[in-house]
Amino acid sequence: MKLLKVDTVNEARSKLIDCCAGTMLQTEMRSLLDAAGCILAEDIYSKENIPPYRRSIMDGYAVRSRDLGAAGDMIPTMLKVIGEVLLGSDSSDLKVEPGCCVYVPTGGYVPDGADAVVMIEYCEPFGAGMLAVSKSASPGENIVSVGEDVAEGDMLLPKGRKLRPQDLGVLAACGVTDIPVFVPWRVTVISTGDELVSPDKMPGPGQIRDINTYTIASRSMAEGFEVIRTVSVKDEREALVSAIETAKADSDLVVMSGGSSQGKKDMTADLIDEAADHGVLTHGIAAKPGKPTITGFDEESRTLFIGLPGHPAAALMVYEQVLINLWRGLICREKERTLKAKITVNVPSAPGRMTFQLVKLSGGDIPEAAPVFARSGMISPVSEADGYFVMTENQEGIRPGEMVDVFLWK
Amino acid sequence: MKLLKVDTVNEARSKLIDCCAGTMLQTEMRSLLDAAGCILAEDIYSKENIPPYRRSIMDGYAVRSRDLGAAGDMIPTMLKVIGEVLLGSDSSDLKVEPGCCVYVPTGGYVPDGADAVVMIEYCEPFGAGMLAVSKSASPGENIVSVGEDVAEGDMLLPKGRKLRPQDLGVLAACGVTDIPVFVPWRVTVISTGDELVSPDKMPGPGQIRDINTYTIASRSMAEGFEVIRTVSVKDEREALVSAIETAKADSDLVVMSGGSSQGKKDMTADLIDEAADHGVLTHGIAAKPGKPTITGFDEESRTLFIGLPGHPAAALMVYEQVLINLWRGLICREKERTLKAKITVNVPSAPGRMTFQLVKLSGGDIPEAAPVFARSGMISPVSEADGYFVMTENQEGIRPGEMVDVFLWK
């Protein structure tokens, strides 16, 4: 193992990026609905104009605006109806000559010659194929022009975009149906500890139910990762080595979560050091809570390792700030919108360490964030909180009235 | 069909609730990880104290604080080490008598007799089973007491909570592993229109690629609904009736999405009226955009129907405000946190109608929301927007500097 060194959160992430940036991302093509919520792996440009033809936004009549200069309530202008555009059929042979008009439904093709659509409300059939129009029209009125929605060559969506429903709508509109997205990491969560029992068991004296398997696995799923395995292993070296080897074979990421005692942490560090050809990269981070965090990388099997603190709050926040931020950096994901909130009381920071502070939010035009304090190992305050904010290593606490960026729990 | 009536958005939702509240919700039991992101169907209370025993939050020695009254850097107090608590084993026979102490790892059981834990840093083995302790301790120091995290009878999580990672952590900690959640609605999306072509086809003159199937299906998925079928049907009565009957048999919700022309809307209304034993409930809502919205309910097959406006922006916003809000109301889901933002320019409202206004957000302590205007049928502005806000029927527009609640796109 290299010289043990406590890194800042940013150093820990940088070390991982330096090792793994070239190898840990794969892309695949997905169809529209299968790409929902996935992360776009390339900038996408339109190869077409949308709409590809002039489209009416109303049920009405396509007219030549010049013909209607004098049209009004009192003296309607009479036009000859020469046809009707049918939705979905080729009406491109229709041509609106002076004094003529063509019926067009909403969304319909506007025939050549016409330069405006008059809403049906202002038109009255007058017999013998004639129409009385009681309103003038400006050129372009009620028409979406070619390429007005999307012009050929426009960038539709940037690499790193998490595909939302309306993003799929844009892709569908432009005929982009093979969508390059990043393959989500496959994750194994290994919880270790003789004291851990499954949540469906009643813990005896000195035992505790496994929490981190469930928080870390579901947080991974919320990020889009594929949790391929959760395993609980006793503190026996052989069993742990075997679980790690199995995980290395098919996982991009192995998350180890166990107790917070020093002995446990040393064992986790040893195991990661043996399993990873780059060895342990970070052994301890300058964070409060979250110090006992260990990272490593195995290049041959392309596997990231992280050993998380045992306390559930610390484990979740470190997992987000180190590992999920690493993923988001690699995939160029747009920065998550944090919520700006006003701090209500003095909140101390831990000098020289990044401090994660749980908060509960209350309403108002500017939301207020009240700190929630969770003693080590407690879970109910974490669930009570709406999220947390971060104070950097050099920040000397926060005073009432200052604004912070709150990371909302997923 | 009942008398055609334009309803407000709230009236439309109320009519649906009145018909369907008793029948449209089912619950099921899920295991912890399968419940991630689901909606809790009952308030959950703890049947246990957590922790069930006194737990140390440090690696250290369990002591009687009274023994250490005089302990300090200069003159340590000597205690006899009578044992060690092992994580995961039954250490309940250990008892700390006066002058004695017991080693306890982080998370370990604190034996009877002890009332504090001294961190290992302040303790030095002195040979012959003796320990030099160079710090006094207050009663309770470094100990989490029984029930301090969760007390027996505490409400853990309320009905309607969308289960986040740390919520699963609380349930795991308390041994709640059969979790009652609402069964997500099963959805069929039917897109209708002779003019619609699949996104992978090149539209001819008068044709348009199907957008709403993809936006509405993926928005449904983002809400947790199960999209069981998306079908595209030509405007032929028989084919539509058949698609609706198939959908009724296995769907909770049938979403019809087609063109915006009046003829299309009349056909959709007729079809829903025939398929639903309660008939059409709302035919047109007082919303801008979104007027051509139709709802219905079939009690026998327990199927909700909604015919959405054809324009993608209108379809998405109406679907959220009418249908998804209906679902959230039924499941008692906690109100989604909207983002407070300051409007930068005058935004007019449509008198007597609820107005949905797309906005793009920019940063700052108080985010600023600039309106995004999407002409009918355009999709790229919808993707460019970060969300939208709502002006009520009686509201007369928004002036620069006013605050609004922005619904962020999913």
Image (spheres, coloured by chain):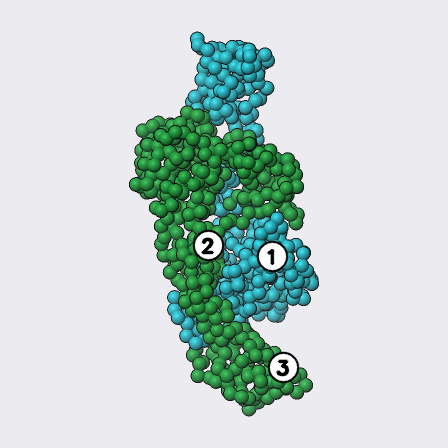
Chain colours: A green, B cyan
> Is residue B317 positioned above or below A378 on the image?
below
- In the drawing, does residue A26 fall left or right of residue A145? left
Residue at 40% in and 40% down: A16
| Quarter of the rendering containing residue B71 | top right
Question: Please, what is the three-letter code of the amino acid marked with disc 1?
Answer: Ala
Residue B276: image location, x then y, percent? 52, 64
Instruction: Please state, as top left, top right, bottom left or bottom right, where the N terminus of chain B lies in the image.
Output: bottom right
- At mark 2, the secondary structure is loop
Instruction: Quickly name the residue at label 3.
Output: A135
Identify the mark nearer the N-term, 3 or 2: 3
Q: Are marks 3 and 2 on the same chain?
A: yes
Distance in Å between CA atoms under marks 2 and 1: 20 Å
Judging depth in this view, the residue of A210 and A371 nearest the camera is: A371
Residue A198: image location, x then y, percent? 43, 33
Residue at 48% in and 81% down: A111
What subunit carries mark 1? B
Quick check: marks 3 and 2 in contact, CB under 8 Å? Answer: no
> Is residue A299 positioned above or below B5 on the image?
above
Q: Nearer the viewer, mark 3 or mark 1?
A: 1
Distance in Å between CA atoms under marks 3 and 2: 45 Å
Residue A161, which numbered label?
Answer: 2
Distance in Å between CA atoms under marks 3 and 1: 36 Å
- In the drawing, does residue B203 fall left or right of residue B25? left
Residue A252: image location, x then y, percent? 36, 43
Residue at 64% in and 58% down: B344
Question: Please, what is the three-letter code of the amino acid marked with disc 3?
Answer: Lys
Q: Are marks 2 and 1 on the same chain?
A: no
Q: Is residue B268 visible?
A: no
Instruction: Quickly name the residue at label 1.
Output: B369
- In the drawing, does residue B85 fall left or right of residue A297? right
Residue at 45% in and 80% down: A91
